[in-house]
Image: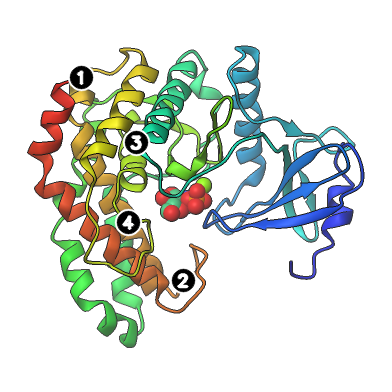
């Protein structure tokens, strides 16, 4: 746990009791997360990654506004614990911290169809319950977050400056990745043309960001911003309906699982309550391709840039992630007709 005195940090929040244990949570590639137990309560303490979130105060303003909105509507959501002086975060020389109450339930990296349907409904509901939230209150915590075209440009910039050894090791992957640059930009172009409605969306709908319990709770609200609902659908499919989990070393073995795709879709459409436009409905399968492609581009960019963004546990992990996600994107792209047929059953 580095040299940070987490006990002293924890005690500056309005928590109930003394911390008895700090257990690192290994899920998540950006923030550092710990589960903390006191005699009567359980909390989640997070150190916000300020390399990724350059304005963490704005992340927390969004977080507080969104959770308050959902709480007022009695929708299961996270509960921030304020600091003893009433702030939603603690900023000190060790960094930037927040605490939420640990909600009961479990998260999954790889979910069964039943769980995926519940995850789909939770993410769908999340967006429909925020349809009446004033989007102008939200800060853009990471500009151009799902601008796939800008992500490809960042890859090109990284290729231009990367060290030669990493270029050599990833030459095939770079070539494969750049082949899809124009298809990958299609959703961005539609948004620019006003063909896709701007909604308040989650933007990081990995399947392990839904807590499944007596009630299901959407976690990780750092990137809630205006965007397309297709971002949420596509990213959840890439993580939840894949036969292999992101980072699996069998990088040629990734494929979308039809049964899980259908299960998530079913739940998602139930949760979004008929709000999706015809264009959005038609593009659901394609969005799974774009979001999977986009994250492949991002992992490859980070590999070429020396692994400064995503947390890694071994040398070359970002390249392994990129290759697997690229295989999955190609698999989805080849099977768009098959996936569209599934959608037609529900539209
Ligand atoms: C990051 O923090 P986490 O693990 O939920 C990333 C997502 C990526 C994901 C890939 C702020 O999400 O965009 O899809 O890793 N979050 C940010 O695993 O960049
Ligand atoms: Mg996240």
Mark 2 or mark 4: whose residue is earlier in sequence: 4
Mark yes or no: residue 195 visible: no
Q: Are marks 2 and 3 in contact (CB under 8 Å)?
A: no
Where does the image place residue 293, in percent across and percent down from the top left?
26, 53
Q: In the image, is 71 to the left or to the right of 89? A: left
Left or right of 21, for residue 301: left
Front position among marks 3 and 4:
3
Disc number for residue 113: 3
- If the image is split into quadrants, where does the N terminus sit? bottom right
Disc number placed over residue 346 in the picture, else none: 1
Report the residue marked by disc 2: 307
Tell me: residue 305, above or below residue 195. Answer: below
Q: Against 72, is 22 above or below?
A: below
Give the SS element for disc 3.
Answer: helix
Measured in 3D between alpha carbons, the distance from the residue under mark 4 to the one under mark 1, in whole angstroms, is 26 Å
Question: What mark, if any, has residue 244 been given in the picture?
Answer: 4
Q: How many marks?
A: 4
- Ligand 1 within 8 A of label 4's CB? no
User: Measured from the top left, where is residue 111 in percent x and y?
Assistant: 40, 43
Q: Kindly report the distance in space between the C-alpha atoms of the residues bearing marks 2 and 4.
A: 23 Å
Q: Residues at badges 1 and 3 in contact (C-beta under 8 Å)?
A: no
Q: Quadrant of the C terminus?
A: top left
């Amino acid at each position: 746990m580095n040299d940070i005195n987490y006990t002293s940090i924890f005690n500056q929040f309005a928590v109930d009791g003394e911390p008895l244990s700090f257990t690192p949570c290994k899920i998540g590639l950006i923030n550092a997360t710990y589960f903390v137990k006191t005699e009567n309560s359980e909390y989640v303490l997070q150190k916000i990654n300020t390399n990724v979130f350059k304005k963490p105060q704005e992340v927390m303003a969004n977080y507080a506004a969104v959770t308050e909105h959902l709480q007022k509507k009695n929708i299961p959501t996270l509960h921030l614990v304020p600091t003893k002086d009433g702030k939603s975060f603690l900023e000190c020389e060790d960094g930037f911290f927040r605490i939420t109450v640990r909600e009961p339930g479990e998260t999954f990296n790889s979910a069964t169809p039943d769980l995926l349907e519940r995850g789909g409904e939770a993410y769908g509901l999340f967006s429909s319950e925020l349809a009446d939230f004033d989007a102008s209150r939200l800060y853009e915590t990471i500009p151009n977050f799902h601008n796939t075209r800008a992500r490809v440009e960042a890859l090109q910039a990284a290729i231009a400056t990367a060290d030669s050894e990493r270029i050599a090791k990833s030459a095939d992957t770079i070539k494969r990745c750049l082949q899809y640059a124009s298809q990958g930009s299609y959703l961005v172009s539609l948004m620019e043309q006003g063909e896709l409605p701007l909604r308040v969306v989650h933007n990081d709908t990995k399947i392990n960001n839904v807590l499944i319990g007596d009630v299901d709770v959407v976690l990780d609200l750092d990137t809630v911003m205006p965007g397309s609902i297709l971002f949420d659908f596509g990213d959840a499919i890439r993580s939840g309906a894949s036969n292999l989990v992101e980072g699996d070393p069998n990088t040629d073995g990734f494929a979308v699982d039809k049964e899980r795709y259908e299960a998530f879709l079913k739940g998602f459409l139930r949760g979004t309550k008929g709000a999706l436009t015809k264009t959005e409905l038609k593009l659901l399968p394609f969005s799974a391709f774009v979001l999977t492609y986009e994250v492949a581009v991002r992992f490859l960019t980070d590999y070429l840039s020396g692994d400064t963004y995503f947390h890694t546990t071994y040398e070359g992990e970002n390249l392994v992630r990129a290759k697997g996600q690229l295989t999955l994107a190609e698999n989805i792209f080849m099977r768009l007709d098959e996936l569209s047929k599934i959608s037609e059953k529900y539209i």
